Amino acid sequence: MGCTRISKATGHSFPSPETVTMSEDFMPAAEFGHSLKGFGVNLLVRKTAPSVAFAREVLGVEVMYRNDDFAVLRHDGFRWMLHADHTYHSNPLQALVGDGALRGAGAEFHLYGIDPDAAEARARARGDTVLQPALDKPHGLRESYLVDPDNYVWVPSVSIEV
């Protein structure tokens, strides 16, 4: 942490998460797009700042980049994106995320290896909604269900003995 990262594909350097500001470049959009493999998640949010703050402060995930339009987050090698609603002006999903929309209904985003008790305590300290406090589950995980500012449900969990 705290150092500049270099793209293996192009040699393009970009700043570490702690030093990124809204005016600095992450990497060219096409380079980032080409780096995506396998399964991807993109969440539409009202504004990136509150969602990034929740992810960093409650879940403890890495913020690779954030500006007012877009953010890239990472946990245990998995990256996901946030796009602010205003960036989807010509996308068909925009009709589904208008004012009052229930975002993420029916979806749970599990983050394995994150202490659910600690995440729950941080969520409560911030005034975030705790949908379910940390509990030991019969499938061998201790989980809590936490709701972010855009009503997405995040489930930090750790393995337990059953």
Image (tube, rainbow, N blue to C red):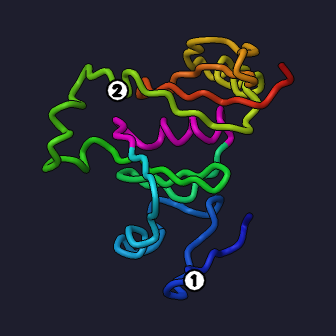
Q: Secondary structure at mark 2?
A: loop
**Mark 1 lies on residue:** 8
Residue 6, image quadrant: bottom right
Say whether residue 25 is visible: no
Q: Main secondary structure of the magenta part?
A: helix
How many marks on residues?
Answer: 2
Question: In the image, which residues are magenta?
Answer: 43-60
Q: Say which residue appears at 51% left-offset and 84% top-offset.
A: 9
Residue 4, image quadrant: bottom right
Q: Say which residue appears at 55% left-offset and 75% top-offset.
A: 14
**Mark 2 lies on residue:** 103
- Judge by depth and name the residue closer to the eye, 19 or 100: 100
| 43 relative to 86 in the view: left or right | right
Q: Say which residue appears at 42% left-offset and 43% top-offset.
A: 48
Magenta stretch: residue 18 in it? no
Say whether residue 157 is visible: yes
Residue 5, image quadrant: bottom right
- Label 2 sits on what residue type? Arg
Quadrant occupied by the N terminus = bottom right
Task: Tell me where residue 91 appears, x and y as whole percent.
Answer: 17, 48
Upstream in sequence: badge 2 or badge 1: 1
| 59 relative to 35 in the view: left or right | right
The answer to whether marks 2 and 1 mark residues whose Cβ atoms lie closer than 8 Å is no
Q: Identify whether 113 is placed above or below 21.
A: above
- Label 1 sits on what residue type? Lys
